Image (spheres, helix red, strand yellow):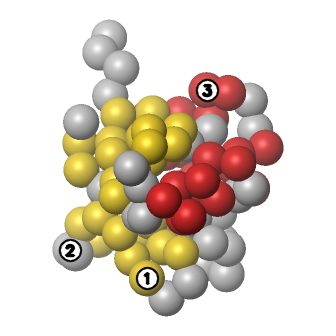
Amino acid sequence: MRDEAWVVEVGRTNAAWLATESRTARLAREYRPVDLGDGRVRYSARALGAARELGEEEDGFLTDDADGLRVWIGDDAYELERE
């Protein structure tokens, strides 16, 4: 089975925060978002699943609707693209 992944550009500060300070950053390695540098973050299928468990009030939560798959930080949404 192919390891699917999604990438999102959120800016350097947000990328570092998602990879090191978010609630999912405290999980086992395979469930964490990875800071790729230059403000980009990579989510594996498992990391995406873990982020889907976050509530709306938490930064880093995901929505998947007609507008696409997006990660939210504060009031800003960033669209994820399949790698």
Residue positioned 74% across, 56% down in the render? 21
Q: Which residue is mark 2?
A: 66
Q: On the image, which quarter does residue 74 sit in? A: bottom right
Question: Looking at the picture, which amino acid does disc 1 mark?
Answer: Asp
The secondary structure type at the circle numbered 1 is strand
In the image, residue 46 sits, relative to residue 16, either above or below, namely: above
Task: Tell me how far mark 2 sits from mark 1, CA to CA.
Answer: 17 Å
Q: Is residue 46 left or right of residue 28?
A: left
Residue 15 disc label: none
Q: In this orientation, which residue lies closer to the viewer: 52 or 78?
A: 78
Q: Which residue is mark 1?
A: 76
Answer yes or no: do the residues labelled 2 and 1 have beta carbons within 8 Å? no
Question: Looking at the picture, which amino acid does disc 3 mark?
Answer: Glu
Task: Tell me how far mark 1 sits from mark 3, CA to CA.
Answer: 26 Å
Q: Is residue 57 left or right of residue 14?
A: right
Quarter of the C terminus within the rendering:
top left
Question: Looking at the picture, which amino acid does disc 2 mark?
Answer: Ala
Q: Position of residue 73 (x, y in %)?
A: 53, 75
Estimate how packed mark 1 is, as few (under 14), some (14 to 19) or many (20 or more) residues with alpha carbons within 10 Å.
Answer: few
In the image, residue 64 sits, relative to residue 41, either above or below, namely: below
Estimate how packed mark 2 is, as few (under 14), some (14 to 19) or many (20 or more) residues with alpha carbons within 10 Å.
Answer: few
Residue positioned 23% across, 42% down in the render? 82
The secondary structure type at the circle numbered 3 is helix
Quarter of the N terminus within the rendering:
top left
Answer yes or no: do the residues labelled 2 and 3 have beta carbons within 8 Å? no
Residue positioned 39% across, 76% down in the render? 77
